[in-house]
Image: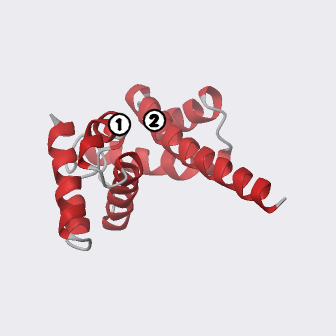
Amino acid sequence: MNKLLLLCLHALSGCAKRVERDRVQELAACRRISTSGDALGRCLMIKYDWDPASAGPPKAAWQRHLDSVRAGTATLEPSESAEEAAAHARRWADCVFRETGGDWQKESLAKFNCRSDLPDVDALLSYAKTIGPDSSRLLLEVYSETER
């Protein structure tokens, strides 16, 4: 019974990560076609079945971003906060370590399976300073070859 419960929990945790990654892709897809925060919210709710509470924060952030672009005070894409960038780098590193198991010969698996979620290079470099040298080298090697 305990083994079955652990197996189910493991399967569910994988689904949660997949859902989170899908949400990032859904948000990016709606940003590409939305000319306002309201349009982004509608896109997320109608096309991807987000509930209004989940769509609200990205909707407001997108509108603020668009307003700042129109005012000439922003870049084309909103940037992650420092905390979000660090969490993104850790998630990507977890993907690389999960795919390779620390084995350099499995590096191509990580380049393929983790390519869609590349973190900001500065956040990755900061994270790499907190882990061992071999792990850092593996991450930076995969990153440098995947980014191209």
Residue corresponding to mark 1: 116
Cα distance, mark 1 to mark 2? 9 Å
Residue corresponding to mark 2: 25
What is the x, y in percent for residue 13?
A: 62, 52
Left or right relative to 136: residue 21: right
Q: How has the structure been colored for display?
A: secondary structure
What is the x, y in percent for residue 123?
A: 24, 61
Q: Residue at x 25, y 74 (%)?
A: 130
Report helix, strand or loop for mark 2. Answer: helix
Of callouts 1 and 2, the N-terminal one: 2
Q: Is residue 81 above or below residue 59?
A: below
Q: Quadrant of residue 46?
A: top right
What is the x, y in percent for residue 141?
A: 16, 49
Q: Quadrant of residue 109?
A: top left
Q: Residue at x 37, y 53 (%)?
A: 101
Report helix, strand or loop for mark 1. Answer: helix
